[in-house]
Image (cartoon, grey):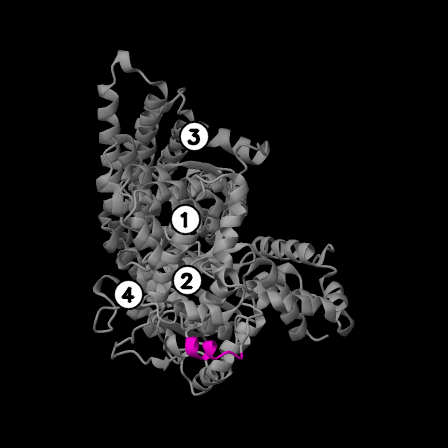
Amino acid sequence: MNLETALASVERLIYAKTGKHFSNLQTIILKQVWQGKKYLAIADEYGCTEGHVKDVASWLWKILSEALEEKVTKTNFRTVIQRKFSPISITTTRAIEPILLSYGSTNFIGRELELAHLQTLINRGSKVIVIQGEGGVGKTTLAQHFLLSQGFALVLEVLMAKETQNITSVESIIEEWLQRDLHEEAGKEFGVTLARFKRCLEKQKIGILIDNLEPALDREGKIIAAHRNYVELLRVLTDLKVKSVTLITSRDRICEADLNLEHYRLPGLNLSAWQEFFLHRQITTNSIALSKLHQTYGGNAKAMEILAGIIREDFLGNIDIYWRENDNDPLVETDLKNLVAHQFDRLQKLDEQAYLLLCRLGCYRYQDIPQISRSGLLTLLWDVEEKQKRTIIESLRNRSLVEFSQAKYWLHPVIKAEAITRLQRREEWQQTNLKIAQFYTASVSKINSIQDGLTALEAYYHYVAIEDFEAAGQVIINSRNNQWGQYLTLGSTLYRLGLIQPLLTVITQIIKKISTIEKHSELNNILGDLYWISGQVERAIACQEATIVAATQCLKKLTELEVNQYRIYYLKMLQVDSLLSLGLYQIDLWELEQATSFFQQVINLAHQTKHHSWSQKASICLDLVNSYQQHRQVDYQTSKQFYQLVIINNHADYNTGRFAFFIQILGQTYLNLGETTKAQQLFERAIAFSQSSNYTQIKAKSLSGLAVIYRQTNQFETAEYYHKQAINLLDNIGAKCDLAEAYFQLGLTLKISGKIEDSKLNFEQASQLFQQINAPKQLAKIRNQLE
């Protein structure tokens, strides 16, 4: 068995297990391990650390072990795969195929000519093809089937919201693709993120499906003003240098003159396809009635499914009886929308409870969570006896009114639109959204992945739908354990996961509608850190100052008669956390006196109280500020204490990803004090934890610190290497303040090593960034080096 055959077999297996294709790094790991390479060599080739490669490889061996029911390791990987996927193991590989074509052979029929036409367009060089057609004609099914058949390394999908006001921003979509599927960091500006995404498309063969785009189009076929950045995405997708193929499904034509889009009008299925489909469902196909139905509905694929379900369920598979009953019925119209409306009316008469479930299912968004588990369905049957629930679900499935695959359910967009319209007219609209929001909140107890975070956030959208903005805000500030052993709000965990843009969007959408002071303040606290991470320091400061003012006012209003210990704890926590954040922001601006003031305030408020951990963090930060100012008279007792705990004692409470940020600060403090051995130990420890906690910023700052250590020992080549690694990482995440400092430090290294012109270029890069941040003292620091 050769390498490519092995990789194809393994990818099919992984896809069947997880529903995801390989990332670029996963592919490289499998190729190199197959060839006997070590993790360190793989890390050097890919440009990451050995620890990161080990983490990704560990996940691969775990999934493969589960799928093959045999322990798979780096050592035995090649042997196991050769044994399992050799020609005599044909049964195993065949068993995977039906899972890959999850749409099912009987549901995908009669499209040979259409598939061939799409292939011809691709062969001619088309990068983006718009499959245009009426609702239910089969645009999405054709697109998904075609993309799965092309052997792409990865297929990315986005389903547009049915309602224009609920369309997800393109910034959020690309950010999620980069983070979750491509394992790359998003930038903090859309242009940076888009450029990074384009580079990914230039490196590997990727399929992209943008499904049901028409809600984002105006009546002239142009992308609506609120979402013009979709045009920029399409511009990238049509670039000749990308290796991607993009299929867009839409009922309407896209009329953007600047974009090179290929439109393909999808016809209905022919009569022979309908005959094949009905035959599979044991319905007589030689009847004139089938021809009449096919003609009436123009070969519409969804109409075919619905009609077959109705005839089997309600007419014992006799198509002639169905036709006789409905031939003269004025409700039997020629388009799918009216057919669907008619079936809703009919279902309401036959099975009121199934009808209610169908209407309630329209409440789910089917966007970030495109399919619903059985538990999600059962949540909507709150008023039905347990013994009846299964029958009701089967009633919808048998009539093809709900889509189903691998224990997941969803609605066709036309059916969803009808369902939500009908539900909005009922009093149950509020209760259904409430039940779904509660379901999503309860379904995630710990956040181990981006998908967990998005699932927990889904409750937010349902509270917004019923204008319960207080509850929507609570979703963001609900705390859970996460994969790094932290107990953080959903908002804090989401930005740790790199989902900056979606979080900024949801908070800014509701924050002015929140009347509860504590809730408003905590959202402001999270928003401040989001602005800080994205380089908007002035906005970040304004958010934290507003939080402090609000929390302080609330504390003053509390009287002895209404003392609520938890409320007092909560308000003081907001105070000290915002003060700590302000101190960190001031360091980035090089306003060291102000930073000292903020850290001292935290210590004064929190020392030996229930918020003592904030006092400890502030003391660590205060030592850093003192070390920058070369205050030799300071004893740096806090730094000594925590160095002992982290390095000497290896204390479990402090050797975790959640403390990595402050381990890095300790390293910087010891570096400033000239104790390079301790600094190096701390930086290396911080890097190790940043790998496991997905905290790129910590890793980059620690690498920059290591670079300075090598500079001080005149190892300039190694120093440059670490500087450039740090700059690359910080540029990837768009951390402007840290990136500016990293350029400054590289400039110093180049200046000391005699590369004067190169050093000036890096000082200039730092200056430009500090100007954008509005940090005059940082600019003065650079000017001193240029004089």
Q: For the residue labelled by badge 4, is the local secondary structure a helix, a strand or a loop?
A: helix
Q: Which of marks 4 and 3 is nearer the N terminus?
A: 4
Q: Earlier in the sequence, mark 1 or mark 4?
A: 4
Residue 4 occupies quadrant: bottom right
Amino acid type, callout 3: Tyr
Looking at the image, residue 720 lies above or below residue 9: above
Residue found 38% across the figure and 22% down from its top? 607
Tag in front: 3 or 2: 2
Residue 71 occupies quadrant: bottom right
Identify the residue under disc 4. 216
Identify the residue under disc 1. 352
Number of other residues with Cα within 10 Å of mark 2, as a class: few under 14, some 14 to 19, many 20 or more: some
Tag in front: 3 or 1: 1
Tag in front: 4 or 3: 4
Residue found 63% across the figure and 59% down from its top? 39
Amino acid type, callout 1: Glu
Q: Which image quadrant: the C terminus? A: bottom left
Q: Mark 4 touching mark 3, by CB under 8 A?
A: no
Question: What are the residue bounds of the magenta stretch?
Answer: 286-294
**Res. 636 mark:** 3
